Amino acid sequence: MTAARRPPLRRHAQPQRSLEGLLKDWQSGPPDVALAARLLDQAEQALGGGTPLPADLWHRWLDTTRRRPFLRSLPDRAQRHRWPTWPSRP
C-alpha cells in the first residue's frame, strides 16, 4: 500500500490563509493595535514572496485597511507610513 501523495504546497499558502484569518478577526471585533500591526506585517510577508494574492483577498485587505479605524490603530507614524508605500496591486 502506498501513501497518498499530497499536493505540493504553494509557497504562500500559509500567509494567504493567515491574512484571510486576520482580516476576519479585524472585521469581527473592535480596533486592536496588535492585530493592526499583524495585518500589516502579514500583508508585507505575503506580497514579498512574488506570488500574487488572489484579487478578491487583496481588494478586501485594501478596503479594510484604508479606513480610519485601522490606520489609527497602527502604533506610530512609521507604521502608518508603511501602508501606502506598496504598489496598488500585487
Image (spheres, helix red, strand yellow):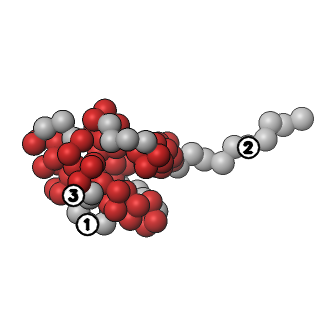
Q: Nearer the viewer, residue 46 or 18?
A: 18
Residue at image position (27%, 48%) is: 70
As drawn, the label of residue 88 is: 1
Residue 51 in view in this figure: yes
Amino acid type, residue under disc 2 in the picture:
Arg
Point out residue 56 in the picture as x, y percentages from the top left corner. 46, 65
Label 3 sits on residue: 86
The quadrant of the image that shows the C terminus is: bottom left
Structural distance between the alpha carbons of marks 1 and 2: 38 Å
Amino acid type at circle 3 is Trp
Q: Earlier in the sequence, mark 3 or mark 2?
A: 2
The residue mark sitting in front, 3 or 2, is 3
Which of the two residues, 16 or 83, is positioned nearer the viewer here? Answer: 83
- Mark 3 to mark 2 CA distance (whole Å): 38 Å
Closer to the observer: label 1 or label 2? 1
Q: Are marks 1 and 3 in contact (CB under 8 Å)?
A: yes
Q: Which element type, helix, strand or loop, lies under badge 3?
A: loop
Q: Position of residue 67 (x, y in %)?
A: 27, 57
Q: Residues within 10 Å of mark 1 (few under 14, many from 20)?
A: few
Mark 2, residues whose alpha carbon is within 10 Å: few (<14), some, or many (≥20)? few
Residue 5 disc label: 2
Residue 52 visible in the shown view: no
Which element type, helix, strand or loop, lies under badge 1?
Answer: loop
